[in-house]
Image: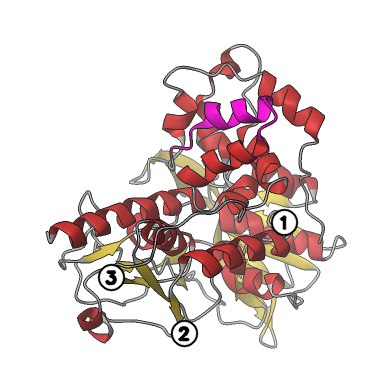
Amino acid sequence: MEEIEKTLSKEQALIEAERCLYCYDAPCEKACPAHVPIPEFIQSIRTGNLKGAREILEEAHPLIESCGRVCPEESFCQSACTRAQIDSPIKIRELHRYVTDNTDPAENLELPEANKEEVAIIGGGPAGLACARELRRLGYKPVVFEKKQLGGVPAQEISPTRLPDEIENREIKFIKDYFISDIKDGKVKTLGEIKDEYKAVFIATGLIDELDLDIPGKDLSGVRHAREILRKIKAGNKSGLGKRIGIIGGGNVAVEVASVLALEDPKRDVEVIYRRGLKELKAFKKEIEEAIDVGVTFQFLAIPKEIKGENGKVTGLLVTRAHLGEPDASGRRHPEPIPNSDFFIPLDSVVIAIGQKASDFFPEVEKTPKGLIKTDDNLMTSVKGVFAGGDIVRGASTVVESVADGKKAAKAIAEFLEGGK
């Protein structure tokens, strides 16, 4: 699969950089969870100092290669761009990517001696890797516990059309080679397994399990879960799904898997089936547009009622037409079924993509009703010296938000270890 978006040329980047107003107290920087000094790195592009631009990005953000491609700029920096009041917002992420694609991450890298304690990091995704990098820069020895592939969701699930393997692998290798003292191949489920060995622990396991759909027919052959499919295709394997596929869900994962399946076989009919309307879709606008461009269609205001089958295999989905009522706890209008409005969508395969949930690990720390880990303002859990961040604290979130947690946790861990608090 070829990458959908192309890197800006030098001329395009310079033209875009010239549009920046270099705002004092820049609102784009405030809107970035990692607080990247956006006007500063854009000014470096404008003056031809790409090395300096990279140094600015790296100082603020440990995973600049990935976020230069997958960060939803329309929800963060670009949404606050002052230039939008004149014509259109600056293409900040595209300029970010231009820098990373044209510079060397290891050039002039300087690190202090690693002469401080080892810190356990459980999980090798964006939050864990960001924490490791920041701790190493402070002289600590990060020890990452990861049973699977380093990199988490970006490395294991995001389509190569958005994040090519060579880009992700290059970034992970750089962090692994320079910022991680040791990697232990194992799944840690309780603090008792490691707590006595380390004075500080950072839990960044993410949301491992997927939510299931409680309707008849969910156990039929041809019913799959979205992240399972994304991991399979990311690993270079075929999905094994049919020609008519229904994706149940309305978030980023649902739209991502729909796009991937449509690209895998352009002759397929891939339809996202969502119980609310277009305005309520939780997926990012750009991902929705890309899905439509590759042929994905959408069935809105349709509540799944039963997955139908014959001889144990999926034949389609029975849905009920809905209308939107009052807002629910999520702040979105609640879908209400319309009586006698059932209709049938013929399908070969059904992919469930209604969200993720936390596994029942780490019973020692306090949890929310949804199973997420509770932390204080410094990301410390109810157990002294144990910190947590990323999806296991926030719920499903973005790479840049997880990175921000990793950075914050590293600083808090250093303060804890140095102050003994």
Q: Does residue 413 appear to the left or right of 327 in the view shown?
A: left
Q: Which residue is mark 2?
A: 185
Q: Does residue 45 appear to the left or right of 262 in the view shown?
A: left
- Residue 278 in the image: x percent, y percent? 59, 40
Which secondary structure class fits the magenta region best?
helix
Type of amino acid at the residue the image marks with label 3:
Glu
**Front-most of residues 326 and 401:** 401
Type of amino acid at the residue the image marks with label 1:
Ser
- Asked whether residue 36 is drawn in magenta, I would say yes
Residue 386 falls in which quadrant of the image?
A: bottom left
- If the image is split into quadrants, where does the N terminus sit? bottom right
- Residue 344 in the image: x percent, y percent? 68, 62
- Please report the bounds of the magenta region as a residue range: 35-49
Q: Which residue is mark 1?
A: 259
Placement of 8 over or under 104, stated as above or below: above
* Coloring scheme used: secondary structure
- Residue 349 in the image: x percent, y percent? 70, 72
- Among numbered discs 3 and 2, the one appearing first in the sequence: 3
Q: Which residue is mark 3?
A: 117
Q: Residue at x 25, y 76 (%)?
A: 198
| Label 3 with label 1: CB-CB less than 8 Å | no
- Residue 276 in the image: x percent, y percent? 53, 46
Q: Does residue 293 appear to the left or right of 211 in the view shown?
A: right
Is residue 271 something one can see in this rendering?
A: yes
Residue 122 falls in which quadrant of the image?
A: bottom left
